[in-house]
Image (tube, grey):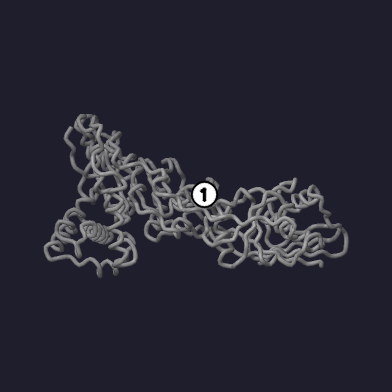
C-alpha cells in the first residue's frame, strides 16, 4: 500500500474543522513534501517526524513522500499534525496496519524522541470528534481536557510507539474516563458577606446578577469597588454544560493556559488599564481571542475605567450589543463569542474624593466633567447601572460579624429570578430585544408617566430608555411580580447615575 488517509482537525477560531492527512509514497529521489496551505511550523514537521520515526526504531522510507493536508484552501498551523503525518507514513509503508485508521482522529506534536507533546485547541476537537463518531487520540497531557466532553471516546498516549502498538492490537490503550462535575462548594468564589456595609451597592450587584446587566461602580479609593466586583461570579447561577464547554473551548485555544479542574468556574478577567485594543478584543496574524472572549459567560472587570485609552474602550461597543467579535485580517477571518457581563469601576473625580466626608476634594465641576468625558457617551449609554459606592464610617469598617446574607443564599434569589425569565422568554432580561421587551414589560399608567418625565428631564437616549425597562423587569422578577410597578421604574431610573447633571459636591 502506498497511500494512507487519516483524520485530524485544524483550529479556526474556536472551531475544529476536519482535515484529511493524505500520505503517498512514490518512486524517485528520496524527498518529503508537505502541501495544503501549511504554515512554516507545519512544514518543519518533516524533520520532527523523520527523527521521531528513526528514534522509535522505524524505517523512514527512502522514497518520494507527498503529504497533502486537505482541504487545500484551509490554513494550517502548529505542530498538531505531527502524529497523523507520522502514522500516515508508517501505514503507507506497511509498517503498521491501516485498517482501523478511519475510526480515529489524531492530534499531537512529536518530540525528536517520539514522545507526544500537548497541543492547544483539544477541547473543540473533542466536541467535533464526538459528533463524527470517531475516537480521538491525543497526548497524555491533553486527556483531562478532552475528557470534559461527555460521550466522547478519548485515548491518551505518551509516545508514538504506544499509538502504533494500539493500532496493531498488541497493547491496547484504555479509554479515558469522563471527568465528574466540579461541586459548587469546591469552586473558588469569594463570599459577598465579607464586604462590610455598602447595602445599596450589594443590592445593585444582586440585580445585575439576576438580569445579566452591566454595572459601573463609582466611588472614592478603598470603598470596596473591586471587592464587590470579585464577588459577582459567586452569586451568578452555575454554568450549564454548554456554557462551560464554550468558555473552556476559548481557554483551550488561548496562550493563557487551561486548568480542567476548574472548567465549570465562571471566568473573571481583570485586564490592566494599559491594555491595548488587540488585548481586549483579540487579534494577530493568526487571530487569537482577547480578554472579552476569555470572559465569555463570565465577568470582564475594568478597574479605573477613565484611565483606559478612549479608543480602546470604543472597541467594546459592538461586543456589548451582539455578544460576539469578528476579527478580520488580510488572509484570515475568525469569529469569537464574547457574551460577557461588564463590571467597571471609577473614581468620581480626578483626585478621587468628590463627595467624601473628609472634604479633601478641591476639584471643580469642570474638572470632574473633563475627567468623566474620557469615557464616551455611547459606552456609558451601554452600561445598564451606574451605582455610587460611598466611603464607609469607621463603625461599619470595624464590624467583625458578616453584614447581610452570604453568596450562596443570594444565589438562590438570583436562580429564582432567572428561572422566571427563562420560563417566560427563554433568555435573561439583558438579552431581550426591544420588540421582545415591549411584549414582556407593560408598564402601568403612573410608571409610564414617571419614565416619560425622566426621559425628558434627563435627556435619556432611546437605548437608555430600554435599559431602564429591562432593569425594571428584573426588579419585578426578583419580587415575583407579573409586571413592573411604579417603585420598580423609580429604582431603575435611580441607577442611571451618570445621566444626570454633574453635581457640585460639598467640600
Residue placed at 43% from the left, 54% from the top? 296
Comparing 423 with 376, the one in front is 423
Q: Where's residue 119, x and y in %?
A: 62, 51
Query: Is residue 192 toward the left or the right of residue 127 in the image?
Result: left
Comparing 282 with 394, the one in front is 394
Quadrant of the snapshot with the C terminus: top left
Look at the picture and state if 184 lies above or below 274: below
Look at the picture and state if 422 lies above or below 112: below
Instruction: Please name the residue that numbered disc 1 is placed on.
Output: 260
**Pointer 1: residues within 10 angstroms few (<14), some, or many (20+)?**
some
Comparing 136 with 84, the one in front is 136
Q: Where's residue 452, x and y in %?
A: 16, 61
Residue placed at 72% from the left, 64% from the top? 68
Residue 489: quarter of image: bottom left
Query: Is residue 492 toward the left or the right of residue 94 in the image?
Result: left
Quadrant of the snapshot with the N terminus: bottom right
Residue 377 visible to an observer of this rendering: no
Amino acid at each position: 500500500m502506498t497511500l494512507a488517509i487519516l483524520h485530524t482537525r485544524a483550529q479556526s477560531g474556536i472551531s475544529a474543522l476536519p482535515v484529511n492527512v493524505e500520505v503517498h509514497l512514490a518512486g524517485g529521489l528520496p524527498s518529503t513534501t508537505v502541501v495544503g496551505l501549511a504554515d512554516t511550523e507545519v512544514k518543519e514537521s518533516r524533520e520532527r517526524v523523520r527523527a521521531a520515526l528513526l528514534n522509535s526504531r522505524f524505517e523512514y522510507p527512502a522514497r518520494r513522500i507527498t503529504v497533502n493536508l486537505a482541504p487545500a484552501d484551509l490554513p494550517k498551523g502548529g505542530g498538531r499534525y505531527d502524529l497523523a503525518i507520522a502514522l500516515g507514513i508508517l501505514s503507507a509503508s506497511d509498517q503498521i496496519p491501516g485498517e482501523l485508521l478511519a475510526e480515529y482522529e489524531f492530534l499531537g506534536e512529536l518530540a525528536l524522541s517520539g514522545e507526544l507533546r500537548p497541543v492547544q485547541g483539544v477541547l473543540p476537537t473533542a466536541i467535533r470528534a464526538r459528533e463524527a463518531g470517531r475516537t480521538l487520540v491525543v497526548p497524555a497531557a491533553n486527556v483531562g481536557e478532552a475528557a470534559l466532553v461527555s460521550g466522547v471516546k478519548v485515548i491518551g498516549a505518551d509516545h508514538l510507539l504506544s499509538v502504533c502498538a494500539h493500532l496493531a492490537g498488541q497493547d491496547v490503550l484504555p479509554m479515558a474516563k469522563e471527568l465528574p462535575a466540579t461541586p459548587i462548594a469546591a469552586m473558588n468564589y469569594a463570599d459577598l458577606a465579607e464586604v462590610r456595609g455598602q447595602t445599596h451597592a450589594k443590592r445593585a450587584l444582586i440585580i445585575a446578577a439576576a438580569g445579566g446587566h452591566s454595572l459601573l461602580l463609582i466611588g472614592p479609593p478603598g470603598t470596596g469597588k473591586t471587592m464587590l466586583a470579585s464577588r459577582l461570579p459567586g452569586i451568578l447561577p452555575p454554568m450549564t454544560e454548554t456554557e462551560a464547554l464554550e468558555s473552556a473551548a476559548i481557554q483551550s485555544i488561548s496562550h493563557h493556559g487551561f486548568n480542567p479542574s476548574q472548567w465549570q468556574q465562571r471566568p473573571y478577567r481583570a485586564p490592566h488599564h494599559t491594555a491595548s485594543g488587540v488585548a481586549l478584543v483579540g487579534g494577530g496574524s493568526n487571530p487569537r481571542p482577547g480578554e472579552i472572549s476569555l470572559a465569555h459567560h463570565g465577568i470582564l472587570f475594568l478597574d479605573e475605567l477613565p484611565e483606559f485609552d478612549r479608543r480602546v474602550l470604543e472597541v467594546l461597543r459592538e461586543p456589548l450589543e451582539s455578544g460576539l467579535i469578528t476579527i478580520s485580517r488580510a488572509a484570515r477571518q475568525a469569529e469569537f463569542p464574547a457574551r460577557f457581563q461588564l463590571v467597571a469601576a471609577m473614581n468620581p473625580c480626578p483626585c478621587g474624593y468628590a463627595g467624601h466626608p473628609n472634604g479633601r476634594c478641591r476639584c471643580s465641576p469642570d474638572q470632574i466633567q473633563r475627567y468623566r468625558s474620557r469615557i464616551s457617551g455611547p459606552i456609558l449609554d451601554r452600561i445598564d447601572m451606574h451605582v455610587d459606592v460611598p466611603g464607609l464610617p469607621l463603625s461599619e469598617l470595624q464590624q467583625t460579624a458578616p453584614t447581610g446574607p452570604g453568596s450562596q443564599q443570594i444565589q438562590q434569589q438570583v436562580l429564582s429570578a432567572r428561572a422566571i425569565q427563562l420560563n417566560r422568554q427563554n433568555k435573561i432580561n439583558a438579552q431581550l430585544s426591544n420588540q421582545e421587551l415591549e411584549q414582556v414589560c407593560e408598564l402601568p399608567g403612573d410608571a409610564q408617566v414617571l419614565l416619560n418625565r425622566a426621559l425628558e428631564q434627563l435627556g435619556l437616549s432611546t437605548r437608555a430608555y430600554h435599559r431602564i425597562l429591562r432593569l425594571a423587569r428584573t426588579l419585578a422578577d426578583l419580587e415575583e411580580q407579573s409586571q413592573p410597578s411604579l417603585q420598580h421604574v423609580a429604582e431603575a431610573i435611580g441607577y442611571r447615575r451618570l445621566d444626570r447633571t454633574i453635581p457640585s459636591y460639598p467640600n
